[in-house]
Amino acid sequence: MSDPTVPSSPSPEPAPGSATIPPIIPAPGEENPSTTAVGGLTPNIAAALAALFSLLGGILFLVIEKKNSFVRFYAMQSTILGIAWFVVAIAFTIILMIVGSIPLIGWLVVLLGKLVYLGFLVLTLYTAFKAFSDKEWEIPYIGKIARQQLAKAPTVS
């Protein structure tokens, strides 16, 4: 047993030249928007989820996330991409209903539709990858529209 009256050994001193930097702790009620997003997720995870789940994920994160511009950008971009995907799907369905019974043309429309859908899928996955990598990447044309829409949206302070 140790004697409580005997002083214990002193705590080790840090090596000269190495400083211990205490973590920065935000004040109560104040969060660092660059490190947290919705529900405690990091911004890159939240943005990747918004991008991955396209229309529904984009709308969900636009409604929930009010402060982090990185997450909001990916959410808006993915919402617009989801709307475009939906419109193209409807257009291909209508075209296929009209010309689907024509032997060669119907087959070409089906093939073209599958290639376009594959393109949308690859674009969605690439966008989610870029968001997860914490890099802001604009989908051509859609990214510019997303920025314009976010600029019009009211800001929350």
Image: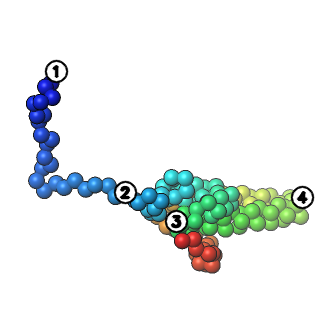
Question: Around disc 2, counting alpha carbons within 10 Å, would you say few (fewer than 14), some (14 to 19), or many (20 or more)?
Answer: few
**Quadrant of the rendered image containing residue 72:** bottom right
Query: In what element is the residue under mark 1?
Result: loop
What's the distance in space between the residues labelled 1 and 4, CA to CA?
92 Å
What's the distance in space between the residues labelled 2 and 4, CA to CA?
66 Å
Viewer can see residue 144: no
User: Where is 35 relative to 137, above or below?
Assistant: above
Mark 1 and 4 residues: CB-CB less than 8 Å, in contact?
Answer: no
Q: Which is more toward the observer, 10 or 42?
A: 10
Q: Quadrant of the C terminus?
A: bottom right
User: What residue is at 89 percent from the left and 58 percent from the top?
Assistant: 101
Residue that badge 4 annotates: 101
Residue that badge 2 annotates: 25
User: Where is 133 relative to 151, above or below?
Assistant: above
- Please state which of the two labelled residues, at mark 2 or mark 3, is closer to the viewer: 2
Give the mark nearest the N terminus, 1 or 4.
Answer: 1
Q: Which mark is residue 1?
A: 1
Mark 1 and 3 residues: CB-CB less than 8 Å, in contact?
Answer: no
What's the distance in space between the residues labelled 1 and 3, CA to CA?
55 Å
Residue that badge 3 annotates: 68
Q: Amino acid at mark 1?
A: Met
What's the distance in space between the residues labelled 2 and 3, CA to CA?
19 Å
Q: Position of residue 63 (x, y in %)?
A: 65, 62
Q: Which is more toward the observer, 93 or 147?
A: 147
